[in-house]
Image (tube, rainbow, N blue to C red):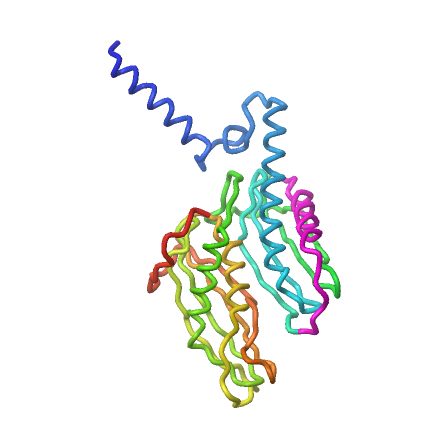
Amino acid sequence: MSSGSSRARALVALSLLVLAPRCASTPSGVGGSGRAPDGLPGDAALLDESRRQEAADLASRVATLASDVHDMGARLDFTLWSEQGTLTLVGYQSSERGGRAGRDTDTAALRRAVAQALLTATHARSGEVALTLRRRPTTWAVEPTPAFHASRPPGVRTTPGHARLDPDSTSTLVDALHHLLEPVRVPEGGTVWADLSLHLEDDHVTGWRLEGWRVLPSSPDGKPRPVSREVALEAAHVVELYAPARGTRALHLGLRLSHRRGASAASGWVEESRVDFPTLPLARQRLGLLPTL
């Protein structure tokens, strides 16, 4: 056999080894599950460590989002798809916002509580997991629900791994969303609803647009106020949670924006969200070169 043929076969074998762990169609118990067919204890330990890292990574992003929510009584609801330790956000909403502000909470303690709740709730092989956070005066109450059987949503991940924007990319996204909200004007003492759409391709944000905004009934006809940058920061943190998924899709965010008299700008939050597959074409403005999430 020629040396050229031997080199070609070696390259093919190496390519298969590199690609195998990324294959989403790997049968249960092989590759994607982290287990070898003979179920060696070392492989089980590796899978357990992957589950722990996945839960810790998601808990960190959940805690980052929650750390900017100060309203006592606020409720954050996350719906996740769990598959062999891999977690994909498929739904998010917040409610009971706008109340009196509580004291700062311990973000590290919240990360630990969320990570433990996710590990406890994801022992099932696959299914939906509900995670609810309720804001107390000085802390967050974490309420997980064990995974229950449901049809697998589109776009979910099947192998665990790190997935987050670096700080520079997060800052770029915040700037982009704040610029997107510039046309929105909230009447002094009033409330506005705004709809944003973001275009995602796998784990990249590739475009976005303001779908529209409207002043809610009973709002006074006061001097218009701009939207604060903190609203864009919360929206970016929600996008970060949704980004580690697969496929071309549209992420829709519904924002409630309110102005308190005496404030220089309107505050607000992401109240509801949804993901559409496949996405409708969006007017695409490039974010620049974002790293892989």
Q: How many marks on residues?
A: 0
Between 208 and 251, the one nearer to me in the picture: 208
Q: Taking 87 as reference, is 280 above or below it?
A: below
Residue at the image position 51 percent from the left and 68 percent from the top: 254
Q: Residue furthest bottom?
A: 221
What's the magenta region?
99-124
Q: Residue 266 in the image: x percent, y percent?
A: 55, 77
Q: Residue 103 in the image: x percent, y percent?
A: 72, 66
Residue at the image position 55 percent from the left and 66 percent from the top: 270
Position of the N terminus, as image quadrant, is: top left
Between 231 and 210, the one nearer to me in the picture: 231
Q: Is-magenta flag for residue 218?
A: no
Q: Residue furthest front?
A: 168
Residue at the image position 42 percent from the left and 61 percent from the top: 198
Q: Is residue 136 left or right of residue 46?
A: right
Q: Is-magenta flag for residue 123?
A: yes
Q: Residue 116 in the image: x percent, y percent?
A: 69, 45
Q: Taking 280 as reference, is 182 above or below it?
A: below
Q: Residue 253 in the image: x percent, y percent?
A: 49, 65
Q: Quadrant of residue 19?
A: top left
Between 55 and 39, the one nearer to me in the picture: 55
Q: Taking 94 as reference, is 150 above or below it?
A: above
Q: Taking 231 as reference, is 290 above or below it?
A: above
Residue at the image position 55 percent from the left and 80 percent from the top: 264
Between 31 and 191, the one nearer to me in the picture: 191
